[in-house]
Image: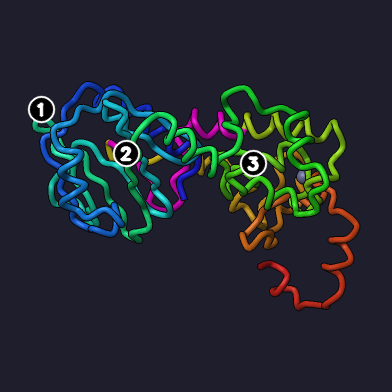
Amino acid sequence: MPELPEVETIRRQLEPVLSGKRIEQLKVIDPKWGSPIAASELAGIIEGRTIERLDRRGKYLIFDLGEECFLICHLRMTGNFLYGAGADVLYQRAVFELEDGQALRFTDPRRFGTAELVFGGDALDQYFAARLGIEPLAGALDGTALKSMTAGKRTSIKAFLLDQRAVAGIGNIYADEALFRAEVHPLRAAGRLTPAQYDLLAAAIQEALQAGLDAGGATIDDFRHPDGRYGSFQDEFLVHRRAGEPCPRCGNEVEKIVVAGRGTYLCGRCQTRPRGALKRRAAPRAPRSGQRL
Ligand SMILES: [Zn+2]
């Protein structure tokens, strides 16, 4: 699933080519995309409007269509916005025909991506206040903020990082990469890090996201740039998807476990396992192959 760096990469490429352009026609090919608004109603509202700007919050893209009208899009698993692609590109769910003859095509093989209309700046703020926490690259994320948000929480720090209502935009890739950089085990209770670990983790989140942005995001499934190119951050992963390979810091074998229902990669030597988790893991004597979930 595209995370903050992937969505921001899309925004940065599209903003200069879309802003100021009028949408002549919106073809909603898959009505589920804008549900519950009917396809014809959605087209009726959007056609003729000008894309004033393209913003991002967490993993959401926000088309500011002027006069307090906002189209909020989430790519979910496999959504992509392609600009300048041919009309025969596969899995199209919506097409924005622009005044200059160009088209912006939303493709989405798994069809989980969504589009929602919101009217008014206050309604937009409320929409995100209910769904998203701190924007990690906007400067408000530090060790003190992490410490206060996790106070008393016994959930794992990995599950906490995946919760968009705490820190927005982090998914499975950047949670693993940030925890490795901060040398914090993903199973550690979110509320039980040391002050120094919260500081390290806040910096590590920002470093991992920035590295992802610098590489144009990671393409491990369907993610591509609006011009069809792939991101390259998958070639720079420190531990994510690197089970069995040497830890780039100590050489120990990177392992894969399941945390919060997600495949999670870590170095067991650099990221010390919390005591409770040690017991849980040692209880069933799973066969060797079973340990590499
Ligand atoms: Zn290591």
- Residue at mark 3 to residue at mark 1: CA–CA distance: 41 Å
Residue 17 x, y percent position in the rendering: 24, 25
Do residues under tags 2 and 3 come within 8 Å of each other at their CB atoms?
Answer: no
Q: Is residue 221 magenta?
A: yes
Residue located at (87% from left, 37% from top): 194
Nearer to us of marks 1 and 2 is 2
Is the magenta region chiefly helix, strand or loop?
loop
Residue located at (31% from left, 54% from top): 108
* Residue 52 vs residue 263, the one in the foreground: 52
- Residue at mark 1 to residue at mark 2: CA–CA distance: 21 Å
Splitting the image into 4 quarters, where does residue 289 fall?
bottom right
SS label for mark 2: strand
* Residue 96 vs residue 171, the one in the foreground: 96
Along the horizontal axis of the image, is 120 left or right of 57?
A: left
Quarter of the image containing the C terminus? Answer: bottom right
Q: Is residue 54 magenta?
A: no
Q: Amino acid at mark 2?
A: Leu
| Mark sitting on residue 71 | 2
Residue 53 x, y percent position in the rendering: 31, 25
Splitting the image into 4 quarters, where does residue 140 fall?
top right
Q: Amino acid at mark 3?
A: Ala
Residue 51 x, y percent position in the rendering: 24, 28
Q: Is mark 3 within 8 Å of ligand 1?
A: no
- Residue at mark 2 to residue at mark 3: CA–CA distance: 23 Å
User: Which residue in the structure is indicated by mark 3?
Assistant: 166
Q: Quadrant of ligand 1?
A: top right
Q: Around disc 1, counting alpha carbons within 10 Å, would you say few (fewer than 14), some (14 to 19), or many (20 or more)? A: few
